[in-house]
Amino acid sequence: MNIGESGKIRKGLLTALLFLAVVQCCGCSNRPDSGNYPYVPDTPAPAPHEGVFASEHGTMTFLGDDESVIIDFDEALSGCLGMSAGEQEAKYVFLSGNLPPHGNVPIRYDVAHMIEIITGDGEDKSYTDIDIGEYQDGTFYTGTNCTTPERITFFVKLEDDGEREAVDFLKQDPTDSLDED
């Protein structure tokens, strides 16, 4: 065997080992038991939010496409979220809790722990992550069935005292705004 053939064999073996290492690593990372993944119920996903959801600190008007919302928050809520006050178009996504090594991942709202609201475009694009859930008996809960088709509750620090408050956005009945003749 000459030196050229020996080099080709080594190159071939190295390539084969590298290929096996990549396949092994990729195969492991895609296995459900190799990391944290969000809980997804084996029930149909709920319909996207649609219509006006109102709170004492503003409104969110969901367009029903599972991504577009028009927000109109007052100074107090906007300030604690680091957003501009007033009406503006935005995008949103519901997120799981932090699931290392993946972090927060998009998930259906009935098992979500956060909502991310995205405002602006290009260099002016801004992301705001807001804890969501349910408030009962003086305790905040997040996760399964806390956010419903009729309610989204933000947990925010409206005051500088460090205490989080629940801000309930409740779906408004569209007939409530119609004037009767």
Image (cartoon, grey):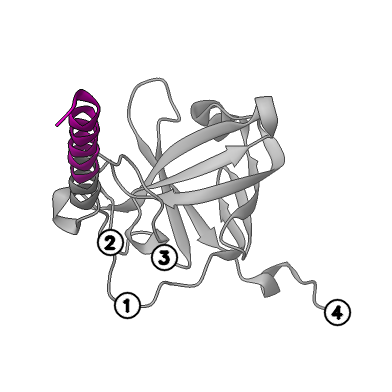
Which numbered tag is attached to residue 144?
Answer: 2
- Residue reaching furthest top? 160
The amino acid type, in three-letter code, at marker 1 is Thr
- The residue indicated by pointer 3 is 148
Q: Earlier in the sequence, mark 4 or mark 3?
A: 3
The amino acid type, in three-letter code, at marker 4 is Asp
Q: Residues within 10 Å of mark 3 (few under 14, many from 20)?
A: some
x and y, in percent, of residue 74 in the image: 62, 36
x and y, in percent, of residue 4 in the image: 25, 27
The front one of 25 and 117 is 25
**Image quadrant in which you'd find residue 152:** bottom left
Q: Earlier in the sequence, mark 2 or mark 1?
A: 1
Give the main secondary structure of the magenta stretch: helix
Magenta-highlighted residues? 1-20
The amino acid type, in three-letter code, at marker 3 is Thr
**What secondary structure is marked by label 3?**
loop
- Residue reaching furthest right? 181
**What secondary structure is marked by label 1?**
loop
Which numbered tag is attached to residue 181?
Answer: 4
- The residue indicated by pointer 1 is 43
Image quadrant occupied by the N terminus: top left
Image position of 129 (left or right of 66): left
The front one of 42 and 86 is 42
**What secondary structure is marked by label 4?**
loop
